[in-house]
Amino acid sequence: PPSPHPPPPAARGGGGPPVCRGGAAPGAPPDPAEVEAAVRDDTALVSVMHANNEVGAINDITEISRRVHARNPRTLVHTDAVQSAAHLGVHAGRLGVDLLTATAHKLYGPRGAGVLYQRAGSPVTPQILGGGQEEGRRAGTENTPAVVGLARAAAIAQARREDDLAHERALQQRLIEELPRRVPMLGVTGPHDLDERLPGNVSVVVAFVEGESILLALDLAGIAASSGSACTTGSVEPSHVLVAMGLPPELARGSLRFTIGRGNTDEDVDRLLEVLPGAVERLRALSPVPATEPPPDWRPWLDGSA
């Protein structure tokens, strides 16, 4: 699926380089062959998320890197590993990328610190000029406490990875199996195979109700969730990621995302399964749109056949 971050205006044609954005197939990560086919002689950079934060799709970055470099050795490959670093672990050399980015707070570390891996010899120009800090890649005084916190958080994540993975997968599977049973006309979005899905990610769409309304009801019950990407929360538009996957825009407005982490428990899942069905039922009863039979183009997304 595409990134939750649309290109800035300059990159969309307001003076910056041309940008080609890839599409997405329902429930599947991008095809490495299609990414390769989009590479031209003048392509400077290919950027693909390692794992999508909205629907949890894990992308085959190793194969994408191999194909892109074979087609144009001058093209740099970047992957956004913000989501995958905590849950899956990343090895830039094995992924074959030239550039990799990650962040501390997704590793339970401090906000305000990040990682940029840059393969030796990659021709990248610093965007902040001045001093020679960080080997000339970014000028300015380093935030040493945040850097130390990031390193410690990464070490803890590495030591706990297998335990965290088993814990998150178990709770994730419970929700993916139980939510469609408990809530009528609710469908799971993203890969159906958990091996192809980010651990802890549970994304769904609920027919005939706005995701933001459900969030308010859950918040009153002490349950934190999001509608679409945290980067676009508050937007009145449906998730462009879901729409790019083929979801009808009106159905995409009912999107919800639950993220399970290290501190969540079986009791948290029980609480969500107890609260959500009643919240959806109440909101549908208040809606002027009758929650009866979904339109034909909604059904594949609600019955899991999309």
Image: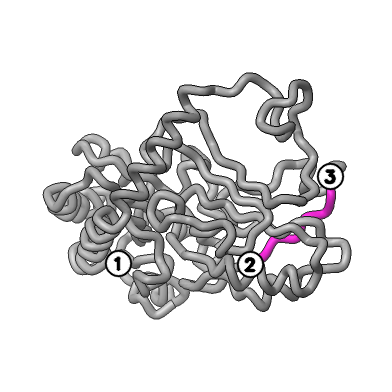
Q: Quadrant of residue 63?
A: bottom right
- The residue range painted magenta reads 16-23
Q: Residue at x 66, y 51 (%)?
A: 99
Query: Which is more toward the observer, 125 or 226?
Result: 125
Q: CA distance from mark 3 to mark 2?
A: 21 Å
User: Residue 52 location in percent, x, y?
Assistant: 49, 57
Q: Is residue 171 above or below residue 222?
A: below
User: Residue 95 location in percent, x, y?
Assistant: 57, 63
User: Would you call the spot at circle 2 few (<14 residues within 10 Å), some (14-19), or many (20 or more)?
Assistant: some
- Mark 2, residue position: 23
Q: Amino acid at mark 2?
A: Gly
Q: Residue at x 66, y 31 (%)?
A: 134
Q: Amino acid at mark 1?
A: Met
User: Residue 166 location in percent, x, y?
Assistant: 24, 61
Q: Is residue 157 above or below residue 49?
A: above
Does any portion of residue 285 appear in the rendered image? yes
- Mark 1, residue position: 185
Q: Residue at x 46, y 58 (%)?
A: 252
Magenta stretch encompasses residue 17: yes
Proximity of marks 2 and 1: CB atoms separated by less than 8 Å: no
* 152 left or right, relative to 26: left
- Mark 3, residue position: 16
Q: Residue at x 87, y 67 (%)?
A: 41
Q: Quadrant of residue 34?
A: bottom right
Q: Quadrant of residue 212?
A: top left
Q: Amino acid at mark 3?
A: Gly
